[in-house]
Amino acid sequence: MIQDKNTILARIIMGEATEEDCRFLKENCTPEEIAEILNANDLAERYKTYDRIDEEQAFQRIRSLLFKEKESKDLIRTTKYWTLYRRLLRVAAVILFMIFGAGYWWYHDYTKVTPPEIPQDVLAAIQTSRQTGKNEASVKTFAANIHSSSNNDTFSEEIIQLLLNKVDNDGAAGNEENNEALTNGDKPLELITTYHDKEFWRTLSDGTLVHINADSRIVYPEEFGRDSRDVILSGEAYFMVAKDKSRPFIVHTQQGDVKVYGTEFDINTRARDNSSKKRDCTSVVLVKGSVGVTPSEGKEYMLTPGQQIIIKDHSNSPYISKADLRPYVAWNTKKFDFEDYPLEGLMEIIYRWYHLDYVINDQSITNTLVSGSISRYDTIEPLLHAISKITGYEVQIKDNTIYINY
């Protein structure tokens, strides 16, 4: 029946309808039904074949042949209503598509994990470290109850402190009460401990690459949760962090936290305090990207590339300064080329590479400028002999300490 009505309407539009056609539609169709048929997709497709027909003229012809004035007005009103309704539906569909498309793009970008791009010189350093036997560490797995009350994927404050105590005590277990949270949990964690003359490279579950220096310890989940990426550190490590906007990467230390916003940086919890010469500070040096450093008691400090922040025990006023990035990048890539470099700065590099402390007996020579090139995998003796020859100073090793005498 609908098909017959469609056919008759098409004949009316084309001016080919008979009186019988008009009588049939008058007897069997209301204005609303006519409007619905006129707005149907199949009839709309027929209109496309009649490219010379003006749509408004066609409606006028139907109204004049079939309906009285009131019915004609009803047809106009109903037809316009359906036309507007269909147009609004199309607009709404486009808007919804755009909203859902933008939402999907935002969510996909927000949760996207992008591993760091590892330069060739870093890959070469990793290979050399393995070939020379320097890439070695103790790796232990244990289960902990890390859950916080607000977020099951975030380390609780209690577990952070327990883990910090664990890494600061050379991985010692601690007392029985503390062990309960670190042995009867459901979250597998790994503890890496490097030896005094070794280093270790580790790729975490999100693709973050960590270069762990000698005599350092790091704890992290075997698999990061959905909401955060927490790492516990004692000692020194160089991080090349995978980008993930939905999960902050946080390095916890005894003196504060480092929150990563996509970056490459070095952390050392045994940095040297130039005033006391003691290694009781935490240093964060930003190479690329952005980090926020929050002391244990204090506000967050944002760093830009090329800056270093020093946090001292019991101090709420960290010291931020410009940093020479070359030693930190060189440690991560195995070679350091230097020209007119301060002697004390070079000794800091040697300390970081070989884990040997140093004493310069005459402070007047600390800024003596030296030039040269050293490889991190060379033995220490030839290097110290070269320093002695270049500077003319006496250089000796005793009890894991280098003494330089004028």
Image (spheres, rainbow, N blue to C red):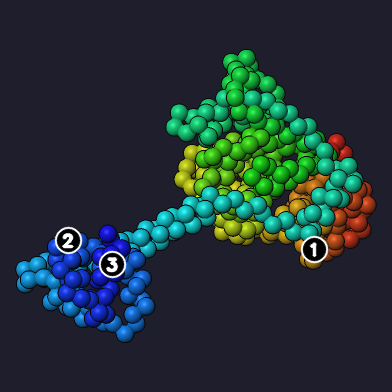
Q: Relative to residue 260, is residue 66 depicted above or below? A: below
Q: Nearer the viewer, residue 176 or 337?
A: 176
Q: Position of residue 91 (x, y in %)?
A: 32, 65
- Tag 1: amino acid: Phe
Secondary structure of the residue carrying tag 3 is helix
Q: Nearer the viewer, residue 103 or 292?
A: 103
Residue in view at x 45 percent, y 58 percent: 101
Secondary structure of the residue carrying tag 1 is strand
Q: Relative to residue 166, is residue 300 depicted above or below? A: below
Q: Position of residue 278 (x, y in %)?
A: 68, 41
Quarter-of-image position of residue 220: top right
Mark 2 = which residue?
28
- Tag 2: amino acid: Asn
Q: Quadrant of the N terminus?
A: bottom left
* Marked residue nearer the N-terminal end (1 or 2): 2
* Marked residue nearer the N-terminal end (1 or 3): 3
The number of numbered discs placed on residues in the rendered structure image is 3
Residue in view at x 21 percent, y 81 percent: 57
Residue in view at x 56 percent, y 52 percent: 112
Q: Nearer the viewer, residue 318 or 176?
A: 176
Mark 3 = which residue?
6
Q: CA distance from mark 1 to mark 3?
A: 89 Å
Quarter-of-image position of residue 203: top right
